[in-house]
Image (cartoon, rainbow, N blue to C red):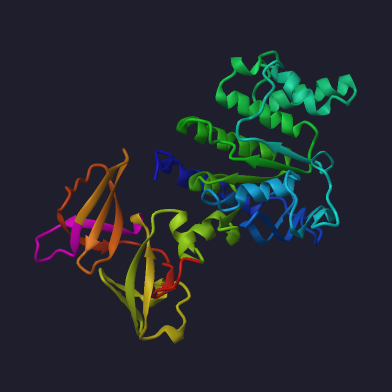
Amino acid sequence: MSAESTTTTTEQAAHEQQRETAPQQVADEPLLSIDEISKTFGTEVAVEELSLAVEDGELLTLLGPSGCGKTTTLRLIAGLERPDTGAIRVDGRPIATGENTFVPPDARDIGVVFQDFALFPHMTAAENIAFGIDDWPESEQQRRVAELLDLVGLGEQGDSRPEELSGGQQQRVALARSLAPEPTILLLDEPFSNLDVDLRVEMREEVRRILKETGVTAVSVTHDQEEALSISDRVAVMHDGRLEQVGRPESVFQRPKSRFVAGFLGHASFLSGYVRGDEVDTTVASIDRDQVHGLASQYDMTEIDVLVRPDDVLAYPTTEAEADGRVTYRRYLGPSVLYRVELDSGETVECMHNHSESLDLDTPVSVTLTADHELVWFPKGSPSR
C-alpha cells in the first residue's frame, strides 16, 4: 500500500455515480470486440484465447503484473502486432482476423497515448496537437487545437515546447494530440508511470474527467492496482496471458474469483475455516455463515480458506497466555501502520492500524476479526487461478 491509498476510497466513491450512468452501446454489438485472440513470440505465449468486449463511452483498464500480456493486448488492438488467431472488431468492422484480415494502424481510427508521451521536442504544444490533423483545413485545425488546449487546461501554453512544460502538462498535450483526430477508441499505455506520486493521483483524475467530457471509449493498461480501481468503469485482470476476471472495480476487489486476483488487488490473508452449521470456525473467530458469500450446502463440515484484508482484522497486545500470535513485521505508512502477525496456527495475517497505535516487533497479540461486510472464501488448497 502506498501514500496514494488514502485517496483511493474517496475517488471510488466520487466515481460511483459516474460508473452507474456510464454511456452504454444501444446496439447488441459492443464498440470493441475481441474474440479468442492469441499471440506468441517464438515459444512464449504472450496472449492466449483472450475475449473481451468494451462498450461505447467506457473506460476499461487491463491490469496485471509485468509479463502478463496486457501491453501485447493493447498493441494487438492498435495494430502494432498481429494476432496469430482470433478476431478484433471495432463497431462491428473486422480489423484483425488472424491471417485473413489486417487493417494497418493508421486506418483503424484508434489513438494511442504512449508511456513516454512521445512529443516532438522541436514543436510547440499546439503544433504537437495539430500533427495528427495536418490534412484538415487550417481554420479547422486552429479551432480544434484551441478547443483541446482549453479542454486539457493549457489554453495559455500553446506556444510552449515540451521542454518548457512539466510532466503533467506534457501528458495533457499527449492526450490532446491523441484526441485531435476524434478517434473511435483511445489506448493509454501506462499513462501515469513517469509521474511522481502526487502528480499521478492528480493526473489520473484529470484524464478521467477529460475522457468522460469527450465521451471517447478508452482502454488503459497499468500494473498499478490503485490507479485501475480509481479511474475505471471496469477492470480486466490478466495473468499469464489470460483474463482472470472482468468487472466493476468494486466487484472485482470485493469478490475476487481467484486467489491471484485477491492477492494482486491488495494485501490478502487467508484464514483456515471449518464450516459447521450456521458458523465458520476460524483460527481467530467464528464467523456467521451468512457473512461468507455464496457458501453452498455441499461445503458443510469441510475446510475452506476465508479471505481477509488488513482492514478486516485488528491486533491487540496481550499476555503470552492469551495471545493468538506475535508481530513479525511492521511498516509505517504515515496515516496508518501495516502489521504482519504470525499466528500460533502457522498462518499469517496482516492488520492495518491507525498511526497512533504502536505495536513493537515480537509483541504477543490477540487478533480480532472486525469485518462487517461479506467475506470471500476459496476451497481449501485451491490453486491461485
Which residue: 26% across, 71% down? 283
Left or right? Give the position of 335 relative to 163: left
Above or below, comparing residue 13 to residue 52 in the picture: above
Left or right? Give the position of 106 relative to 315: right
- Which quadrant of the view contains residue 375? bottom left
Residue 194 x, y percent position in the rendering? 53, 32
Q: Is residue 315 magenta?
A: yes
Which residue: 80% across, 62% down? 28
Of all residues, the one furthest to the right in this rendering is: 137
Residue 182 vs residue 67, the one in the foreground:
67
Residue 119 x, y percent position in the rendering? 67, 25
Q: Which residues are magenta?
A: 311-326
Which residue: 50% across, 36% down? 201
Above or below, comparing residue 310 to residue 209 in the picture: below
- Which quadrant of the view contains residue 318? bottom left
Of the 4 image quadrants, the one containing the N terminus is top left
Above or below, comparing residue 318 to residue 300 in the picture: above
- Which quadrant of the view contains residue 97? bottom right
